[in-house]
């Protein structure tokens, strides 16, 4: 079924695509498709989602999409679910079953919030992915980039106010609307959930010399770092040079204020990979192989160069780890104890996981528990076990494979962002912003690539 048959998809002609989409710097609402209106508004309203607390937004999104579809067309037509959708649903069911049996044998029960949380983080995204794949939803790159540009401008303005007006003073966080509705304490303490409080920055922590560690409109610095890293990659696909420079510069500065070292190191690596892929596609694989051979020869054979590179890498790694030494030490202790618990676990726990986090490694600080701060080691191997790893790997690999199969017209940033995720998962949890970024990446479409392809076919 062709995606052009649906009114909520991209149906503009080439003139509208390039010349009539924007009036000045504002997109013309009448020229946007239904999908573009939903995605664009969803991104622009990120500050509002932060005030709410980011809670259950994916569940609300799924309910809204299918409610609209039913009332608009009197029925919901979906294709057969893909392996990606089935694997993600299986992963969610595995989580629920694991928690149920853990509670059964440990005199506890599966809470309503845990159940709804599972629907929000896994089942709702699975339903939205199913909808996107069935309808082949497309959103123009320019619309997504414009919406993210608004968010970047708002974050820069907020930083200017915090830094120059408030002087990054220590403050007592206010509760989010969700925190108020759920009766959270007025005074914030680590472990009460960042979604229940409005924490734009942490004055007692530092990202760069003289700068506090910023969260802005997100749960934490890691969530912020993943979003702005995606924005940086997305900006590289823009044809407008000035727009690219301004958006990339603003997003990269915000990335620095997050103090997330894993994203600092991963983003340049992904940009290099992007350049290699683009160069290989246009110049040929032989050029890439030649460059790799030349660089390898220079670095490994010429002794002074080898020593210089080795010393530079060693000093960079040491400086990165010492930038926030206390954080590095705590993480190292978490990883050490988590790995020890995995080695000491019974066959049953090794296969099905420990289900819940272990003890804290830093008394008085609840988030520093065994099984945290690493999606691979903690969330998968320790919590979910080998069975959980197998189910999630099926979902993750099939999703990337589907993206590659449907790569025509898709910005390369929407594919290589999964490489960045895969790298940062080593030292980062599956942050709350990962799934929304995935949904945006699945829908973003570069109409200029399609037009160029059509011209080549006609010629």
Image (tube, grey):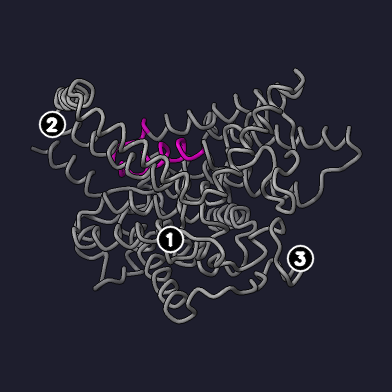
**Dot 1 crowding, Cα within 10 Å, few <14, some 14–19, many 20+:** many
Q: Is residue 203 visible?
A: yes
**Dot 3 crowding, Cα within 10 Å, few <14, some 14–19, many 20+:** few
Query: Circle 3 sits in a helix, a strand or a loop, which is it?
Result: loop
Q: Within the magenta stretch, is there residue 434?
A: no
Residue shown at 68%/66% (left/top)? 178
Q: Residue furthest top?
A: 347
Judging by the rendered image, the residue that carries numbered circle 1 is: 257
Q: Say which label, 3 or 2, has the lower sequence index.
A: 3
**Dot 2 crowding, Cα within 10 Å, few <14, some 14–19, many 20+:** few
Q: Nearer the viewer, residue 176 or 436?
A: 176
Q: Is residue 161 above or below residue 268?
A: below
Q: Which mark is drawn over residue 283?
A: 2
Q: Marks 3 and 1: CB-CB under 8 Å?
A: no
Q: Is residue 49 visible?
A: no
Judging by the rendered image, the residue that carries numbered circle 3 is: 182
Of the 4 image quadrants, the one containing the N terminus is top left
Q: Within the magenta stretch, is there residue 411?
A: yes
Determine the CA span between mark 1 and mark 2.
37 Å
Residue shown at 68%/27% (left/top)? 340
Determine the CA span between mark 3 and mark 1.
31 Å
Residue 437 pos. (x, y %): 46, 49
Left or right of residue 1: residue 180: right
Q: Marks 1 and 2: CB-CB under 8 Å?
A: no
Segment tinted magenta in the rendering:
404-425
Disc 3 vs disc 1: which is toward the camera?
1
Residue 369 pos. (x, y %): 69, 43
Left or right of residue 365: residue 37: left
Residue 95 pos. (x, y %): 71, 36
């Amino acid at each position: 079924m062709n995606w052009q048959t649906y009114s909520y998809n991209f149906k503009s002609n080439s003139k509208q695509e390039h010349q009539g989409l924007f009036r000045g710097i504002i997109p013309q609402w009448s020229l946007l498709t239904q999908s573009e209106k939903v995605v664009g508004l969803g991104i622009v309203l990120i500050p509002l989602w932060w005030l709410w607390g980011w809670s259950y937004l994916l569940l609300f999104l799924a309910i809204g999409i299918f409610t609209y579809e039913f009332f608009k067309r009197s029925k919901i037509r979906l294709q057969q679910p893909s392996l990606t959708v089935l694997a993600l649903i299986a992963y969610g069911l595995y989580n629920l079953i694991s928690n149920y049996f853990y509670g059964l044998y440990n005199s506890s029960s599966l809470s309503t919030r845990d159940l709804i949380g599972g629907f929000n983080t896994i089942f709702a995204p699975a339903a939205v992915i199913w909808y996107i794949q069935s309808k082949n939803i497309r959103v123009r790159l320019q619309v997504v980039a414009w919406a993210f540009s608004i968010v970047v401008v708002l974050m820069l303005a907020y930083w200017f106010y915090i830094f120059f007006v408030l002087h990054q003073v220590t403050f007592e966080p206010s509760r989010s609307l969700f925190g108020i509705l759920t009766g959270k304490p007025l005074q914030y303490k680590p472990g009460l959930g960042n979604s229940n409080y409005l924490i734009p920055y942490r004055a007692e922590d530092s990202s760069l010399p003289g700068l506090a560690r910023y969260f802005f409109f997100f749960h934490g610095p890691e969530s912020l770092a993943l979003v702005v890293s995606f924005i940086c990659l997305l900006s590289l696909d823009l044809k407008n040079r000035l727009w690219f420079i301004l958006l990339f510069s603003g997003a990269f500065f915000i990335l620095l204020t997050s103090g997330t070292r894993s994203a600092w190191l991963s983003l340049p690596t992904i940009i290099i990979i992007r350049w290699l892929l683009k160069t290989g596609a246009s110049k040929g694989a032989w050029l890439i192989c030649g460059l790799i051979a030349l660089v390898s020869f220079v670095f490994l054979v010429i002794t002074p160069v080898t020593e210089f590179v080795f010393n530079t890498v060693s000093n960079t790694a040491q400086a990165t780890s010492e930038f926030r030494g206390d954080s590095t030490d705590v993480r190292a202790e978490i990883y050490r104890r988590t790995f020890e618990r995995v080695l000491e676990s019974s066959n049953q726990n090794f296969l099905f996981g420990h289900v819940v986090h272990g003890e804290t490694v830093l008394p008085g600080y609840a988030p520093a528990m065994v099984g945290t701060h690493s999606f691979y080691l903690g969330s998968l191997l320790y919590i979910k076990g080998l069975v959980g790893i197998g189910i999630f790997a099926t979902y993750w690999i099939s999703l990337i494979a589907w993206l590659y199969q449907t790569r025509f017209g898709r910005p390369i940033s929407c594919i290589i962002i999964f490489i960045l995720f895969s790298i940062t998962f080593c030292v980062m949890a599956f942050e709350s912003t990962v799934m929304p970024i995935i949904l945006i990446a699945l829908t973003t479409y570069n109409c200029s690539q399609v037009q160029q392809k059509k011209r080549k076919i006609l010629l």
